[in-house]
Amino acid sequence: MAGTGSGPAARRRRVVLATDRQGRSRDAELPALVAALRERGTDAVAADWDDPEHPWSTADAVVIRSTWGYTRRPAEFLAWADRIASVTALHNPAEVVRWNHDKRYLAELVAHGVPTVPTRFVAPGDPVVLPSSGGFVVKPTVSAGARDSARYTQEQRPAAEAHVRGLQDGGQTAMVQPYMERIVEGERALVFLGGEFSHSVRKGPVLTDTGRVDNSRTPHPDLVEHVPGAAELAVARAALSAVSGACGAPDAPLLYARVDLALDTDGSPVVMELELIEPNLFLTRTEGGPRRFADAVGRL
């Protein structure tokens, strides 16, 4: 990102990578991204999104990076995103953040014709309806890293119903999905930077046992490089193309996006999640990943 003006007194553009206490302790990529931005000539720093003393308005851009504790305070986080967007450029945009923070966006992807894992949403007060056959998964619509999620068999329906009711009692909407049996072949995570495909990894299944909520699970186990096929790329691009129409954001490439895909029973890819707020982008697992991220920031 070039400085403004010319000559030795030219001011370098300032970019803040938003994180939080949890992100600082777990985001191993954060130092590499700050370094890559600085190498590009950007005045880059990391700051906690909930730090009331940080001078956000002095930044030329704020990039949401690893605000991983926001799911416990979503209303506060959304208000912060709106506030930052009113004083500087926020990436991804506040409209995208508001739309993407709740996984009910999956229904809108379906409405836009994007192949998506079938999902039933059960809001507080709704009757609990579970699949009548096969394994299934219960999780909250506002969550990250498989928190408060579990997989169930048909024999475990009472525990699953209790799980849903517990989420409802806490004021949360639950989502119920069929367990994708071919997830054992790996969930595909396709990463896009500045609207362009960057790289992809394949990760092992997270919910390897049944009937148990375990928030200590590793969210991205057994990572390996992955070369996506044409069908996977097509589904990922279709999902990204639907974003602006679904949430009212400007029709412009997003700074970053991660599209998580699974294989349906016939081997066709379907969207599991569309991660547009603070996803792990696996940038240090691909050659030149932090540099490509810094280049994308530079094109803002």
Image (tube, helix red, strand yellow):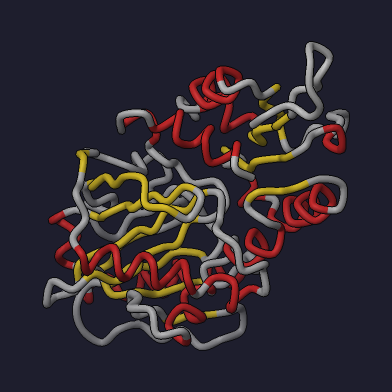
**Residue 255 vertical position relative to residue 32 in the rendered view, above or below:** below
Please name the residue shown 58% across and 66% down the image.
Answer: 102
Q: Position of residue 228 (x, y in %)?
A: 21, 55
169, 62: nearer the viewer: 62
Quarter of image, res 18: top right
109, 232: nearer the viewer: 232
Q: Position of residue 216 (x, y in %)?
A: 40, 39
Quick one: quadrant of the N terminus?
top right
* Direction from residue 60 to residue 181 in the image, left or right: left
Quick one: quadrant of the C terminus?
top right
Q: Position of residue 296 (x, y in %)?
A: 53, 41
**Residue 169 vertical position relative to residue 46 in the rendered view, above or below:** below
**In this figure, what is the number of numbered marks?**
0
* Direction from residue 266 to residue 283 in the image, left or right: right
Please name the residue shown 64% across and 29% down the image.
Answer: 21
**Residue 203 vertical position relative to residue 133 in the rendered view, above or below:** above
Q: Which residue of the protein is positioned furthest toward the top in this rendering?
A: 8
Please name the residue shown 50% across and 64% down the image.
Answer: 140
* Direction from residue 185 to residue 5 in the image, left or right: right
Q: Position of residue 198 (x, y in %)?
A: 36, 45
Quarter of image, res 223: top left
Please name the residue shown 44% across and 70% down the image.
Answer: 162
**Residue 20 vertical position relative to residue 196 in the rendered view, above or below:** above
